[in-house]
Amino acid sequence: MVNIFEVNETNKMIDQEHLDVRTITMGISLMDCIDSDPGRLNEKIRARITQAAGKLVETGEIIEREYGIPIVNKRISVTPVSIVGASACRTPEDFVEIARTLDACAKEVGVNFIGGYSALVANGISRADDLLMDSIPEALAVTERVCSSVAVGTTKGGINMDAVRKMGLVIRAAAERTAAQDGIGCAKLVVFCNAVEDNPFMAGAFHGLTEPDTVIHVGVSGPGVVREALKSCRGQNFEQLCETIKKTAFKITRVGQLVALEASERLQVPFGILDLSLAPTPAVGDSVADILKEIGVEHPGAPGTTAALALLNDQVKKGGLMASSFVGGLSGAFIPVSEDQGMIEAVEAGALTLEKLEAMTCVCSVGLDMIAVPGKTSAATISGIIADEMAIGMINQKTTAVRLIPAIGKDVGDSVEFGGLLGHAPIMPVNSFDCSRFVSRGGRIPAPVHSFKN
Amino acid sequence: MQKVIITVVGQDTVGIIAKVCTYLAEHHVNILDISQTIVDSYFNMMMIADISASEAPVGEIQEALAALGEEIGVVIHVQLEEIFQKMHRI
């Protein structure tokens, strides 16, 4: 039987160290909604989502109460909309209409985000993909809860530079279209290399084509718990440090696994995967940056940061893998800037630059995330940053992503404010040398060689 | 058997255990184990109890005990045991 110290340890993690289940995400296939008539398509989507996810939020809340563990978000991911809408949509406006339907469904069932307004264009852009990409700025401006992602590269297929160039323009357009709200459209838009089909985290979640009709994915979190545990091994060597991270990750993940199985059983929906990510929030004490500081760097960005992050990411996986029957999604430490108070402080202190963040993304999940850049940053420069990040993912066989927010009318020294989980961000300087000749070449970067690894 | 963990934390005072146990007895909740310590001068009690004979669902017991806790000036949580088992046992 459990003893009082174990019970107290668990409850201290929940009450004081922000242990929570970050999200229960229901993946819903919209393949059976496909129709050549836009009106009928939207009607079928509405019926499908509200029927499948009608009890999602309520069930999440019951589990939350019975076990005493906060489940912060309940979310939905759907089949990439460029596929679902390919038959019906003739114009970008037709796609925007689907975004409106998704937003209405999200509000009706009470989820805070719905992901899957997506296109998979790593090997080429179809007519529907092109329309969807054109519609993204408007779709994200007229909806509140819809999240969008575009996958532009893979390790096996290379990088579609036409899509990279286009996404630079789309990101700028989305920022301009939502300039009055500090470019919040861009906070809901991710560009991926090696996108995964079972990711429960937003803004990049979509329901992959290899997934079943409906599925439950769960994302666990708990950077605060890891940081508290590491306080007990100050001054100790790396072996003890790594052992502590692994044990803590195991405990956190077991809670996620329990919640995932309960949700799956109560909703009568198959369990997909558990995503072992350390996902920060802007709340004080819920920070991945604070773990890096506890490991021993003054601020993230100081020399040693990449190594510290690499070991953290690896130990979280090692501890978490044994605690769950199916691990998937992104699984790693997230390093968003605006969503992590410690990262924000590091930028403000001058310790953390865009270039160092890029290096950090080589060893962790996922990429350049929630970074505000000056409003004058050109579309070509944004595309160049995307291309660099995609190349890291392609060569290293990992998922990488870019979620940049050009702050229209603002510059270094200003900040943007989104509120809630999305937080606020100081605007970071961007290398101002030109890359437009590179970006405008057009075509694709071929897939890399899979041998001769150096 | 459906086991719950009841934790009571707060300023020590006369009759905390009595009041909690009275509520549990009245609602046919069987106590399997009790342990208690004082941590930093705070009263800290944990009970393992079986609620399968109780007609009240776990949500109702949670609310009633939370209200009782407020009356006495302590914090009472009721949680299904599995979360602790899963976290601390392989």
Image: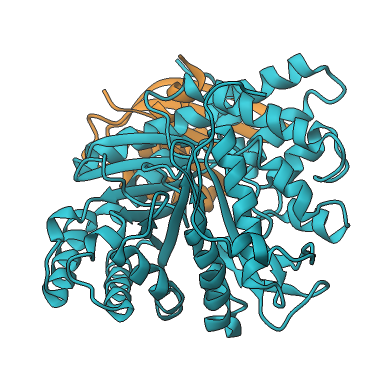
Residue drawn at point x = 37 percent, y = 27 percent:
A326
Residue B46 in sight in this render: yes
Image side of residue B73 versus residue A207, left or right? right
Residue A364, image x and y in percent? Answer: 63, 37
Image side of residue A398 versus residue A348, left or right? left
Kindly indicate the quadrant of the structure image that contains residue A329: top left
The chain coloured orange in the image? B
Residue toward you, A452 or A402: A452
Residue toward you, A249 or A164: A164
Q: How many marks do you count on the picture?
A: 0
Image side of residue A365 versus residue A66, left or right? right
Residue drawn at point x = 24 percent, y = 29 percent:
B52
Residue A282 in sight in this render: no
Q: Quadrant of the N terminus of chain B?
A: top left
Residue A406, image x and y in percent? Answer: 65, 72
Colouring chosen for the image of the structure: by chain
Q: Is residue A229 above or below residue A54?
A: above
Residue drawn at point x = 72 percent, y = 55 percent:
A341
Residue B89, image x and y in percent? Answer: 47, 16
Kindly indicate the quadrant of the structure image that contains residue A5: top right
Residue A200, image x and y in percent? Answer: 41, 46
Residue drawn at point x = 64 percent, y = 50 percent:
A388
Kindly indicate the quadrant of the structure image that contains residue A398: top right
Q: Is residue A242 above or below residue A253?
A: above
Q: Is residue A342 above or below residue A99?
A: above
For chain A, the rendered hue is cyan
Q: Quadrant of the C terminus of chain B?
A: top left
